[in-house]
Each structure stands twice: as structure tokens, then as C-alpha cells.
Image (cartoon, rainbow, N blue to C red):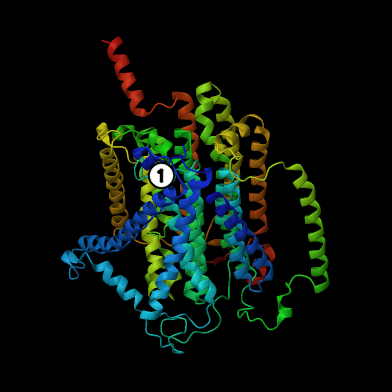
Amino acid sequence: MFDSFLFYLSAFLTCFGAVLVVLERNLMHACIYLLMSLIGTAGLYFTLGADFLAATQLVVYVGGVVILMLFAIMLTGGGLENKKDRLANLLSYIPPMGSLKSYIWGSITAVAFLSFSINITTKLVKSTEINGSIKIGPTVEQIGVKLLTDHVLMFELSSVLLLGALIGTAIISRPSKEIFLERK
Amino acid sequence: MNDNIVSYVLSLFDTAPTPLLVFLIFGVAIFILVNVMALIGGLGTYAERKISADIQMRQGPNRVGPYGILQFLADGVKMITKEDIIPSESNKFLFTIAPILCLSGVLATLAVIPISSGFILTDLNVGVFYLLGVSSLVGVGIFLGGYASNSKWSMLGGMRGASQIISYEVPVTISILTIVLLAGSLSFKELISGQGGYPWTWYVFHNPFTFVSFFIYFVSALAETNRAPFDLPEAESELVSGYHTEYSGMRFGFFALAEYIEVFVVCGVAVALFLGGYKVPFGLGGDTIFGQFFQIGSFFTKTFLLYYVVIWVRWTLPRLRVDQLMSICWKYLTPIALFNLVGTATWIWLFENKSMVELLMSALSGSGSTGH
Amino acid sequence: MLTTNMDIYIPVVALSAIGVLMVAGALIVGHFLRPKNPNKLKNQPYECGEDPVGSAWANFNIRFYVVALIFIIFDVEGALMFPVAAVFKKFNEVGAGGVVLLSILVFIAVLVQGIVYCWKKGDLDWVKSFKVPDSESAHEVKE
């Protein structure tokens, strides 16, 4: 019974959070709804039995990316406008990104694509039980063994990727020489 | 591997699990744990005032109840009946969410704390990693608290607090990695089962690298909880009260409660990782119910000793400046932690995971039998 | 020993819910116990007795953002190292410990190069002192 409760709770958090992110005018509120959505995604990973992936989602996304986004909003001076969120009229519920036409076209396309893909996948999946078909095993050890035997090159390449990201950060955030000469 | 208190209780009575029984046992255990933690949080404030009074050669609270022990109840009543002032320009939604995030983040870490071999609420397979992730919610809560108050002091305190918390998570992660190398698993029960009851079997004395790693973990985790000497985000002399300037009454009470429970959790994790967890020396009690009580006692004794050290450090050392804070983290603690990680891995490879004491004993007995 | 596999996550959900309920409960209880006299002076943000001037945030330093980015990179590195660290002991018993040690060393060496680069170029300093090449005065920006 708790299986389905956990699944429904995580799905509700994910979808509701995502919808609120799109509909919210205030940037900081949207970040908090994103946090809610990411926690829901971690819950979905838990229901699938991928506990290490869920914990990684919590550590990297909830603990890092959300704070990064909050800092980025502060950096670009956001959050100062739209302090009062009043709903003027029903038209203000249209999301700020894009016009009415693009919103309608986008939703029609999404519904069409979703119905098509669900039609295909439900024919392939034999049973839709949630519990009983997931094996809770030590996923951490399996991932570790795979990382060191099959995918060891990917493991080392990921460190090079992280090094590239680090150097890119350092270079982008460095002020250029012209700024000093101006300040004198 | 995935033991928890329900399986322990059910094995005591030899009954089969039903959903109702599972929920009931979990409910009772969570209720007990949350109450005990709230009590520890409240008594922590009392202990802090008494110990600081002792260090500063004065009395401390001694009016409310015998030796002033009910002081935290009086503080709680005062906080609830205070007027709830929300600043006019603030963001009401974020203002309310910030203490909720802090408190939920800290309470969710309680689910994996190993109090005894039977009383772990749930021994997740990724226990340590999950704990790291959930305790980052406190950083988000602090930042929101600073931002939502819309006052210059709070904003500055919130930004500094959040950047301090995320910076010091790096040495904490690397120190925990050092112990995971030794134990071979991420679940708390396996981390503790690799240690024994006697001090020389603890991981802190396993090799010199883990010894240094213990201090790095302790210092970094202390900085993560915004505790002195790292309490710049809430510094009284600089920022009036940092990110919780504008919070009054019970809202401030939740920030304080979350901080004290977080200090307890940090000490508990340090005990579980480095100081042998709940293992009792001489194996007192064995596998019976009495053994559980001995284990609970052992865990709480070690944790409270570390808690005392935390309070002692706060009232002894001066506060660090913000640039000293950041340079300590990135220029000293992180390189030393990385060096410890590599050193421990090398030690395990060279000496087949034998601790210093084992090597010493085998060297002494080996030379004793062949020498002279 | 549980009814389903997911029962181990009950305390996680329950404790987070208790966190939310505790705050909500205390605030609701206090709602009835508190005095309620909002006053324009009381609701002003605190500025040591002066009248608050201007909005709360005028200037922002980029080093907060740089610290957050560097943290994410080391966080992902830690997350990648956790499974490797968890199986190192098993590999060591089989005899392949040296190879795993080599992988770990290469991984960490690459990232140490990154942190050395940031250190040398001054990105880890909280107080940056910029020395303009053709003048004697150094301009210091302190937070």
C-alpha cells in the first residue's frame, strides 16, 4: 500500500511543481517549485528501486543546482520586479514564455505525441504492477563494479569533463583588463 | 542491509508483518525519536547557556525549575506568545517556507541515524549519501530566509551562509569517502560493523590518514551547521543577526531548533563513522534486549561528549572573517582531505586493510618469536 | 521482513511531513495565542534605528556564483567516487586493488589539476587584489 502512496506522492510533486514553475511570475517562487519538482523526481527514482540514483539526485540537484540557480537569479538582478503577484484577470494565467498561439500549438503537439507514445508502449509492457517486479538489490555495488570494469574509460573521461567545466568557470568569471583601467 | 526497527521488533516477537503493524511500529518509533530530538534541542540551549556560564565564571540560568533546567520550556512559551511580525516588503511565501525547509531537512536526516543495532529507523543502502543530500536543504532554507526578509543585513547573511554551507560540503564528502573506502559500503550498519567496541578498533585509529580525516570532518561539519567559530552568517556584531534578523517568535524558534538538532546529527554521524558507533566495549549485553540498551547508552555517551566539545569550541575561539573562512575550506581542508583519500586507498592496497594496531601487534609478536 | 520493498522509505516521508506539520501547527496555535497589532513602524526592516533606505540588494559579487559552480563540480566528483569507493575493498581482496588504485589516482589527479589552476589564477580568493600592470596602486575589492 505504501508503494502506490509513494508513487502517487512523487508523481504529484513532480507534475504539480513543473506546472507551477511554468505558471509562476515571480522568479524566486519558480525556483522553489523547481525544488519541489526535483524532490518528486528523487521520490520516483526511489519507487523504481534505484536508490543510489535518487540519493545522487538529492545531493547534486537539490543541494547544488537549486542553490546555483538561486545565486544566478541574484546575479542577474532578478526577483526585484514582480514582487506582488496579483492575478489581474484570467489572461494573466498564460505563461510568460511565448504567446497565446505558441502555447496552444505546443499543448496540442504535446498531447498528440504523448498519446502516440503511450499507445505504443502499453502494447509492449506486459504487466503494470508496481511492486513485486522491482528487485531491491545493492545498486551501489553494481554501479561501482560496472564503472571499474566495463566503463572505466567513461569514468576517467568524466573527470576530464569536470576539469573542463572547472576551467571554463574560472575563465568566464574573471573580469577583463579593461574594467580595471576604467576604474582608475 | 536494509534492516530497520520494524524488522527488529518483529523478530523479537516472531510475528509476520502486516501493513497495519508496520505503520504502527514506525509511527511509535518516529514519535519517540522526534520527541527525544526536540527535547535534546531544547536541552541543548540550556546546556549551552550553562556551559558558557561555566567557562565565563558565572551562574547561568538557575531560576526556572531545579538548577534552571526548565528554562527551555519558558523560552518556548515566550516564543509562541510573541507577536508575529512579517516585514512589510517581504515575500510572504518564501518567508514562511524558509523555516519549513530547514526543519524538514534536519528531521529527514534522523531517519538513518544509527542509535543502536535495532533502533535504526531505516538502514538505507545509501545511508550516508542520502544524509549528505538531505542536509543540503538547510542551505536552501538559510538562503531563502535571508532573501525573503528583504533587509540588507539578512540578504548578506543569507548569501554568506549558503556559500559557506556549500563550500564546506566538499571536505565533508571527501572525508566520508575515506571511511567508505575502509568499510566497503554506504549503509550505516555496515560502517559500524567494521569497527568494534574497543577504542583501538575504531576507524579513527585505523591509519594516520583517517585520524586526520576525523578532524577534517569534524571541523567541516561544524562549519556546515553555522556554528562558531564559523557563525559569520548570524554574527551578532556584524550583521545584527544575519539571516534571521527579521524572524521573531516561533519562526526564529524553528531556525534555532533546526540548528541544535543538526549539531546533534553531525556529532552522531561522526560517532558512527569514526568512533565506533553504538558498539559497546567487552560486548556487554550481547544480542539480548539489554544489549540494545547498552548500545543506546554507548551511542549517546559518545555523541554528548562531542556535543560538549562543540559548545566548548564556540565559547573559546574567536570568529573567523569571511575570506579566512573560504580560504580555509578551499586551500587547506580540501587538499588535505584529497590527500587523505589517496593515502587511505594506498594503505588499503599495501597492507590489506589492516589497521595500525594490528600491524604493530603482528610486528611485535613476529619479532618476539624470531628475535632475541 | 516487511510487507513491501518500499516500506523502508516510510520514515523518510513521515519525518519530512512531520517537519512541515510542526511548523504549521505551531504557527496555527500561536495564531490564537498572540497579540496582533501591526504597525507601520514595527513592520519596517531593521536598520539599527535609522529609516531604511533603498531596496535590499544593490550590488552583487560574482564570487558567490563562482563558489557555487566549483562546489557543483566537486559534488559530482564525490557522487562518482562513492560507488568506486564502495567496491574498492572487494576488488582488493580479489587482487585487482592496484588497478583500481590507479583509476582512482588518475581521476583525482585530473581534478587536483583543476583546483591548482583555480588557486593559481586567484579564483579561490575572497578578496581579489587586482594589480594593474602599468600603475603602482593595487585596487582591492573587498566584500
- Residue B73: tell me if it is visible: yes
Say if A112 sits above or below B7 in the image. Answer: below
In this view of the protein, can residue C134 be seen by the observer? no
Residue at 42% across / 43% down in the picture?
A: B4
Foreground: C133 or A21?
A21
The outermost residue toward the left is: B66
- Name the residue carrying label 1: B6
Residue at position x 24%, y 34% in the image: B284
> How many circles with numbers are drawn on the protein?
1
How far across and down, in percent of the image, does residue B173 sit?
49, 46
Work out whether residue A179 or residue B225 is closer to the camera in this orientation and state it: B225
The percent position of residue B367, horizontal first and vertical second, equals 31, 14
Residue B84 spot, x, y in % from top left: 41, 79
**Residue flagged by tag 1: what amino acid is it?**
Val
Quick one: quadrant of the C terminus of chain A? bottom right
Residue B33 relative to residue B324: left or right = left
- Report x, y in % for residue B275: 34, 40
Query: Image quadrant of residue A22?
Result: bottom right
Q: Residue at x 58, y 34 (%)?
A: A144
Helix, strand or loop at label 1? It is helix
Q: Residues within 10 Å of mark 1 (few under 14, many from 20)?
A: many
Is residue A171 placed above or below B277 in the rendered structure? below
Residue pictured at 54% horizontal, 36% vertical:
A138
Q: Chain of mark 1?
A: B
Front residue of B81 and B342: B81
